[in-house]
Image: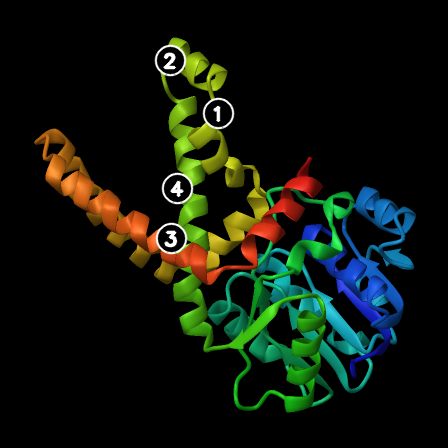
Amino acid sequence: MTVHFHQAAIIGIGLIGSSLARVLRRKGLADKITGAARSEKNRQTAVALGVVDEAFESPSDAVQGADIVFVCTPVGSIAETVGGIVSALKKGAIVTDVGSVKTEIVRQVAPYLTDSFSFVVGHPVAGTEKSGPENGFAELFEGRWCILTPDAGTDAKAVAAVREVWEIAGMKVEEMSPERHDKVMALMSHLPHLIAYTIVGTAADLEKETREDVLKYAAGGFRDFTRIAGSDPVMWRDIFLNNTGAVLDCLQRFSEDLTVLQKAIRQKDGAVLQDWFARTRKIRREVIDMCQAQPENEKLLIKNKG
């Protein structure tokens, strides 16, 4: 281990921020950890749990003297947060984010960038439907991917430091363009969440008697598939508002596929349905095989959600 910070600051002490702070503490990556959160309850909880040493309402107060700053706020407020802390940053500080959208963040943060600090655009692809510092846990990142999207002008040492933090947290780190990141996330993360929210909404709009039956017998597929609809609504509102193009493209493709299946069901075309299900089942198995570290991590998620 080569990375070590006198002080690290976490802006947004929710699930991701508090889990990261726990990693920093457990691995001895920072002598001091400060945090900022709008909620007084989250600030008090984070300090009481030892997640951070000090918690502030103002991000500018939290970043005073910090060598590295992790912006763990919803996507819609990342640029505003960076802009608000620029004048308080230590010269040479590293600032990085954890947002699930990258192209729009790069565009929004650009006006605030100066030579006095480095901004490394990043996204640890991890989480649960829970929120708040009490639900964080250091193992959240183990076996998961972290995607960094630095441009050619980003300081190489800063990128290396951020990469090492996530690797120490147990993540596999890859670099790609912001545009590619957003297309990948739109399909593998953003669209599934949109579908889950929609299915729950559809169930809620059913006739009273049918809705009560759905809720009464909710288990298996419905319960497991819609688990992610319990995620933070503000976070997902911001994601869809900031990754509009990629999400709409994936949604259009998904709608076209649904139309094919709808036609097959109406025409009772079992061959089309079986072929579709067999092909997608095979693809899913291939995906699972590629994620060999996933099962152990899922056990940790289940344990910490309980």
4 or 1: mark nearer the eye = 1
| Quarter the C terminus occupies | top right
Query: Separation of disc 3 and disc 4 at Cα?
Result: 21 Å
Amino acid type at circle 2 is Thr
Query: Separation of disc 4 and disc 1 at Cα?
Result: 18 Å
3 or 1: mark nearer the eye = 3
Relative image position of residue 165 (x, y in whole percent) = 71, 73
List the residue tagged with mark 3: 285
Relative image position of residue 17 (x, y in whole percent) = 72, 57
Q: Which mark sits nearer the N-terminus, 1 or 2?
A: 2
List the residue tagged with mark 1: 219
- Give above or below for 30 relative to 273: below
Dot 1, crowdedness within 10 Å: few (<14), some or many (≥20)?
few
List the residue tagged with mark 2: 210
Query: Separation of disc 3 and disc 2 at Cα?
Result: 34 Å
Dots 3 and 1: beta carbons under 8 Å? Answer: no
Q: Is residue 12 visible?
A: no
| Quarter the N terminus occupies | bottom right
Dot 4, crowdedness within 10 Å: few (<14), some or many (≥20)?
some
Res 21 quadrant in image: bottom right
List the residue tagged with mark 4: 195
Amino acid type at circle 3 is Arg
Amino acid type at circle 1 is Ala
Dots 3 and 2: beta carbons under 8 Å? Answer: no
Q: How did the renderer colour the structure?
A: rainbow
- Give above or below for 258 relative to 163: above
1 or 2: mark nearer the eye = 1
Res 271 quadrant in image: top left
Horizontal arrangement in the rendering, residue 286 relative to residue 265 (left or right):
right
